[in-house]
Image (cartoon, helix red, strand yellow):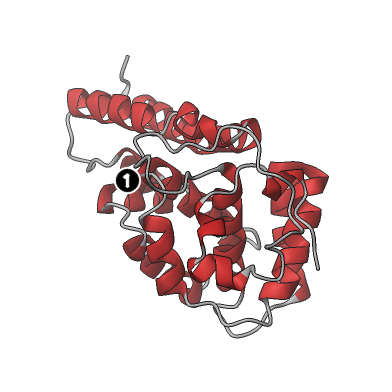
Amino acid sequence: MAKFGKWIGAGLGFVLGGGPIGALLGFMIGSAFDTPTGNQTMPGGDPTMRPTGRGDFLCSLVVLATALMKADDKVLRSELEYVKGFFRQNFGPEGEREALAMIKELLSKTIAVDEVCTQIRFNMTHDARVQLLYFLFGIAKADGNICENEIRLLDNIANLLGINEASYRSVKAMFYDDLNSAYSILGVSKEATNEEIKKAYRKMAIENHPDKVGYMGEDIRKAAEEKFSKINQAYEQIKKQRGMN
C-alpha cells in the first residue's frame, strides 16, 4: 500500500471522511498515512464538519488533473511528462513523486467528475476552488495547446465547482496572450472607462491575493502568486495601451 508523505499527508480533512475522492484514493488511505499536522481549518467553515486542509486540496488537484489527462481517451507519455513537470515546478521533487504515484493508480480507475466536484464544492472555499481551476488550466496548457475535449471538461468542472462566471472567464483568459484577454482577466469590456478598469483591478487583486489560500501551505501560496501576477500584467498592458497613469 502506498504511503502518504508530508506533501499529501499533512492536512487531510474531508478526504478522510469518505465520499468519491476518498473512495478513489482508498488504496492510500487507512493506517498507512502520516498523522495530519498543521493548520487544517477552512476559513469560515462549519466547525461540525471535517476541516479542509492542504492535503484535501492536493488530492483534489491530482484527481481532477488525472481526469483532465484522460479527457481525450488517451494518455500520452508527453502529457505525463508535462504533468510531472508541473508538479515538480510548483511543489518540488516530493510533490512530483507523490503526485505521479497517485496518478498512475488513478489512470486505471473511472473518475466520476461530477461527484468529485460536488464533494469539493461543499468542502472548499471559493478562493481555493478558483486556484484549483487555475492549476488545471495550467496543466491543460502545458503542452502548448488546450484541446476541445479539455475545454469542455474544464467548462464542466468550473460549473460543477460552483465557480462564478466572472472568475471562470478571468482564469481562462490568463492562458491566452492578447489584449482582449487582458480585459477578460479583469472582468471588464474594452468599452470600460479608465475608472471602471481601475476599480475592476482593485477588486480582482483583493479577490485573488495569494494570502487567500495561504492557510493551505507556503508552496500553494507561492504557486498562487503566478495567477496574481497575471492580473497585474493584464492591468499594466491595458494601462500602457490606453496611456493611463
Give the image location of residue 101, x and y in percent: 78, 64
Q: Which residue is disc 1 drawn over?
A: 184
- For badge 1, the amino acid type reads Ser
In this view, 162 is above or below 185? below
In this view, 5 is above or below 244? below
Residue under the point 45% across and 44% down = 128
The reply to whether residue 145 is in sight is no
Residue under the point 58% across and 43% down = 54
Q: Depth check: 139 or 43 in front?
A: 43
Give the image location of residue 137, x and y in percent: 51, 57
Q: Is residue 59 left or right of residue 178?
A: right
| Image quadrant in which the N terminus is located | bottom right
Q: Depth check: 17 or 72 in front?
A: 17
Name the secondary structure under disc 1. Answer: helix
Residue under the point 42% across and 49% down = 129
In this view, 181 is above or below 81? above
| Image quadrant in which the C terminus is located | top left
Res 241 quadrant in image: top left
Q: Is residue 219 left or right of residue 116?
A: right
